[in-house]
């Protein structure tokens, strides 16, 4: 998937879209996506000016966005104005190495369990074959108040 199809699938937009490309997707199973980490990212202005490091919470958010793409493709749908796919839980999160400008952050997410509205995943973010972060994620599709 290229960026156009990602934009058609997820509701996220700049500066909060954290998936640049999907390299592999097996519907109902797993996704391998990537985030190209650039010094031009807004967060590097303050985190940290003397040693720019991608915030861990954004690495986990990138994994959640990849999970969202996997779920939407598995459901055969896309984001719409009547609902939101919320990131609702995280367990067993560990950060193993810093992610810095110039890195290509590979986002590996697999579905562990799913029900109609609640999905559980295993996510691993890697740089150059090394684990940067890993976490168990949970997301839920919710109707917006007054919608759907």
Image (tube, helix red, strand yellow):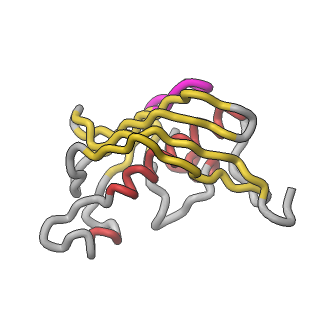
15 up-or-down from 79: above or below: below
Residue 11 horizontal/vertical position (percent): 62, 57
Q: Main secondary structure of the magenta part?
A: strand
Query: Most extreme residue toward the left, as rendered?
Result: 50
Of 60 and 17, the residue lying toward us: 60
Looking at the rendered image, the quarter that the C terminus falls into is bottom right
Of 67 and 20, the residue lying toward us: 67
Please tell me which residue is depicted at 73% across the width and 52% down the height of the picture: 142
53 up-or-down from 115: above or below: below
Residue 76 horizontal/vertical position (percent): 72, 34
Q: Is residue 82 found left or right of 40 in the rendered image?
A: right
Task: Count the marks.
Answer: 0
Residue 92 horizontal/vertical position (percent): 39, 40
Residue 138 horizontal/vertical position (percent): 56, 43
139 up-or-down from 100: above or below: above
Please tell me which residue is depicted at 76% across the width and 60% down the height of the picture: 81
Of 23 and 110, the residue lying toward us: 110
Give the magenta-colored segment's residue range: 23-31
Would you say residue 111 sits in the magenta stretch?
A: no
Would you say residue 30 sits in the magenta stretch?
A: yes
Of 132 and 113, the residue lying toward us: 113
Answer with the quarter of the image where residue 80 lies: bottom right
Q: Is residue 42 found left or right of 65 in the rendered image?
A: left
Please tell me which residue is depicted at 21% across the width and 36% down the height of the picture: 128
Please tell me which residue is depicted at 20% across the width and 46% down the height of the picture: 97
């Amino acid at each position: 998937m290229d960026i156009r199809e990602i934009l058609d699938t997820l509701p996220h937009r700049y500066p909060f879209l954290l998936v640049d490309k999907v390299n592999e997707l097996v519907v109902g199973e797993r996704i391998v996506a990537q985030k190209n980490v650039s010094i031009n990212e807004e967060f590097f202005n303050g985190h940290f000016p003397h040693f720019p490091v991608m915030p861990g919470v954004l690495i986990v958010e990138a994994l959640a966005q990849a999970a969202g793409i996997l779920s939407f493709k598995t459901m055969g749908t896309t984001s719409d104005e009547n609902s939101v796919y919320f990131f609702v839980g995280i367990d067993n999160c560990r950060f193993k190495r810093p992610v810095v400008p110039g890195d290509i952050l590979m986002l590996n997410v697999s579905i562990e369990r799913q029900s109609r509205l609640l999905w559980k995943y295993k996510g691993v973010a890697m740089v150059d074959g090394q684990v940067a972060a890993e976490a168990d994620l949970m997301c839920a599709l919710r109707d917006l108040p007054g919608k759907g």
